Image (cartoon, rainbow, N blue to C red):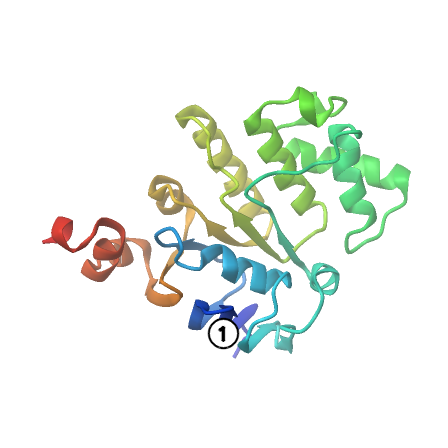
Amino acid sequence: MSQSLLEVVDVHKRFGGVHALAGVSLTVERGEVVGLVGPNGSGKSTLISVLAGVHAPTAGQVRLEGRRVDREAPHVRSHLGVARTHQIPKPFESMTVRDNVALACMFGRRGDGLDAARLRAEEYLDVVGLTARADARPREVNLHERQMLELARALASEPTLLMLDEVLAGLNPAELDEALGVLRRIHERGATIILVEHLMRVVTGIATRIVVLDRGVKLADGEPGAVMGDPAVREAYLGREAVA
C-alpha cells in the first residue's frame, strides 16, 4: 500500500482563547489537487501556516511521506519539498523578476549557483507566462503578474507539495482563465497542490477533491460535485435561511 504524501492527524491550533483549528484530520495523495475551502475565519490559512511550519500545532501531528514534521522549521520543510504562496506577494523590489525567481532556486532544494539559478529561473517564468517580464522590477508589473511571480518563486524550490493561499485573488475573468491554465500546467509537471480559494469557479475548475472547513472543523471531504451539493456545506456558505 502506497504511503500518502501528507497526513494531518487531529490537528488543533489555539491562539489564546481562539480555537482556530479543532481536530482537523486529512490526507493528501500524490498527484491530487485538493481545494481547501470554507467561509471567512474557517481556519484555511491557519492550516496552511501549520503545514508550512509558520505555526506549530497546539496538538496533533503532520506527516510528510511518513516523516513527522510538525515541529520542523519552515526551511526544513522547504528542503523536504513543501512550498507555499502568500495572499499578498512580497517580492524583493530591488531585484528583477528573473532574479527574484533565481534567488528561490539558489536557496531551494538544489542550491544552484547564481548562473545556474538564472538559467533555471527562465524555465519557471515560462511556465507562469512571465518570460517577457524577466528584466522588469516587481513594481513595474501588474497585480496578475505579481501573483504569477509569487507562483514562480514557489515553483523554483521544486516542491512535491505546493500550497497556494488565494494566489488568484483580485483577478478579472480573463486573467482567471489564464491563471487556471498555469495551474493545470504546474499540475501536469507532477506537483501535488492544496489550493485555498474563495471562487468556486476556480476550485471546481481544477480540484480533484474538495475539503471544507468551518469554524476550525472539517465539515466535508470528497468529490467536488458531491461536496458542493451537501446541505451542510451550502448552509456554511449561504446560511440556514438561504438553504431552506
Residue 170: image location, x then y, percent:
46, 32
Query: Which residue is rendered at x = 43% and y = 46% of the image?
Result: 197
Task: Report whether 108 appears left or right of 112.
Answer: left
Question: In this orientation, does residue 229 appear?
Answer: no
Q: Is 143 placed left or right of 223 in the picture?
A: right
In the rendered structure, the answer to whether residue 75 lies left or right of residue 40 reads right
Looking at the image, residue 37 sits to the left or right of residue 29; the answer is: left
Q: Nearer the viewer, residue 214 or 178?
A: 214
Q: Secondary structure at mark 1?
A: strand
Q: Position of residue 227 (x, y in %)?
A: 28, 58
Q: Is residue 126 above or below residue 64?
A: above
Residue 142 appears in view: yes
Q: Is residue 94 above or below residue 112?
A: above
Taking depth in this image into account, of 173 and 20 the one nearest to the observer is 20
Percent x, y of residue 166: 49, 44
Q: Amino acid at mark 1?
A: Val
**Nearer-the-camera pick, 175 or 215:** 215
Q: Residues within 10 Å of mark 1 (few under 14, many from 20)?
A: many
Q: Residue at x 66, y 46 (%)?
A: 154
Q: Is residue 26 above or below residue 167?
A: below
Q: Residue at x 56, y 72 (%)?
A: 57
Q: Which residue position is annotated with label 1? A: 11
